Image (cartoon, coloured by chain):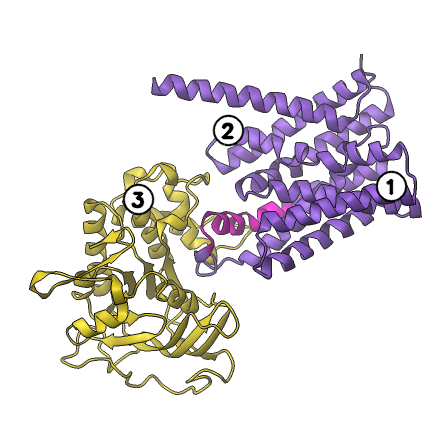
Amino acid sequence: MIDLGAPYVQRALLEMLLLAVPAGLLGSWIVLRRLAFFSHAVGTVSFPALVLASAWGIAPQLAALVAALGFGVAQERLERARRLGADAATGLLLVGALAAGVVLASDVFESGTEVDTLLFGSLIGLGEREVLLTGVVAAGAVVLDAALRRHWLGTGFERGSARALGLRPVLADRLLLAGVAATAVVALDAVGALLVTVVLVVPAATARLLTDRLAQLQLAAIALAAVEGVGAVWLADAMNVGAGPALAVLGGAVFALVAATTALRARAVTA
Amino acid sequence: MTADRRRGSIGGAAGPAAGSGGAAGPVPGSGGGAASPGSDETNACGLAVRGLSGGYVPGRDALRDVTFEAGPGQIVGVLGPNGGGKTTLFRALLGELPRRRGELELPGRLAYVPQTERTRLDFPVSAFDVVLMGAYGRTPWFRRVARRDREAARAALDRVGLAERAGDSFGVLSGGQRQRVLIARALLQEAPVLLLDEPLSGVDGVSAARIEALFGELRAEGRTLLVATHDVRQAGEWDRVLCLHGRQIDFGRPAAVLSPETLRETYGAELIVLEGGDHAVGVGHHVH
């Protein structure tokens, strides 16, 4: 039975509840704007930065944020060269970062078992600073979404008219990517570098199956992320596994259940 | 309707008319005959383009030497093959072409109606949501779209005959209905000039009739319409025709411009000549 009085459990639950806010708000845009692969890559490119931060004793969030934003800039440059598609650019940078992280962790700094924590997260490692940072990012996501949702909606729906409509597609898109990067960075502590998409993508993708309205999608994604996050804390504590894998299993199961249910319902309607 | 007038040269000194400034004057190839609504001689609050060239890649202009004027209450048919520069012209007028040279004189912000194929049908937006986008540019981020604009959005949907479909998802509408929703969005922008990118391609008969009737109403209101189309016969019924094929082939009154020679130069092998002298153009799946 989970010990709700244990400080690390309380921090973990608070972390997951706070994380649900940017996960639902920005996760909905990630799904709608087809940025899931980018989100996965942002988490992965932070892996070598986290290894370096651990070895050099600098703040891991700062190192991860620099890596994530650097990745965004590098990807934009590669895409602008028009010789690489977005997916190819993301894939190249992703495997390069993963390889660099593995080499740094195994051969340069011999990080050992710490690598598991970096890749898959740890509830025990969550301190007050991590929770506070997640709270800041959650508040930032609320402001960002309120300020830019019309830009993201108009640009995502049809980019060619965006400027004629008075929108600022380039700036808005850069801020969306920055928001996704910041959310991925604070999610790293809980779920690890390889599994940030279980927070950023899975709840919103599940909610997308249930609704055709943006506000409902975002609220449902926040609620799902919160429920799955709390469930993952319980599962991780009970089974002594990382929160990332626990959340991945839970999120995947819920998605499969919702997908099967909606498919069966659609079939029943057409029959 | 927006009345502010914006004039300016664009790009570097390489353009034929770059930085030349000056008032709108007669445009070569503007045809002759009696003045029609918004005639060439009085282009106040109309659209003037001089020596426009530009493209996406340095040293490779997708469009060259475009010079024309369109006055209030005029409909200009923009003809050209696929890849001939119609959409590129619109992007240049909207300020979205990466590299441009020449001079533009605009009567304010332009409204753009894209081809429906360019929209995301899986986006969680209703027809009303899409029309409301037309008011985004004048709505502060911290405010809801104003009640006046919401009412205007409903009126715009009513005007295109889709008031009863306001709550329907954009993606479930037919191609013609989607096109009408996008036109309603442009109406909400209250722009003096509308750029319409093949608004009649592939739409059903009901939608086509609605859209053509709306064109007449907008012309009567004094709005300027630039309509990219493959339908030569239809363009012949409008006030001016602009023929493009990577460059400007001709511009002027339909009777003066729509000659077999000009059309052949515009469309090349894609031109189909019908019996009796009418011309139809077969471009990919578009056959008129």
Q: Disc 2 marks which amino acid?
A: Leu
Chain letter for yellow? B
The residue labelled by disc 3 is: B175
Residue under the image location 60 percent in, 21 percent down: A254
- Which residue is most to the left? B276
Residue under the image location 83 percent in, 16 percent down: A3
For the residues bearing labels 1 and 3, Cβ distance under 8 angstroms: no
The first of marks 2 and 1 along the sequence is: 1
The residue lying toward the viewer, choosing from B124 and A18, is: B124
Chain letter for purple? A
Distance of label 3 from label 2 (alpha carbons) = 24 Å
**Relative to B239, is A249 above or below?**
above
For the residues bearing labels 2 and 1, Cβ distance under 8 angstroms: no
Q: Element type at marker 2?
A: loop
* Left or right of B238, for residue A102: right
Q: Disc 3 marks which amino acid?
A: Gly
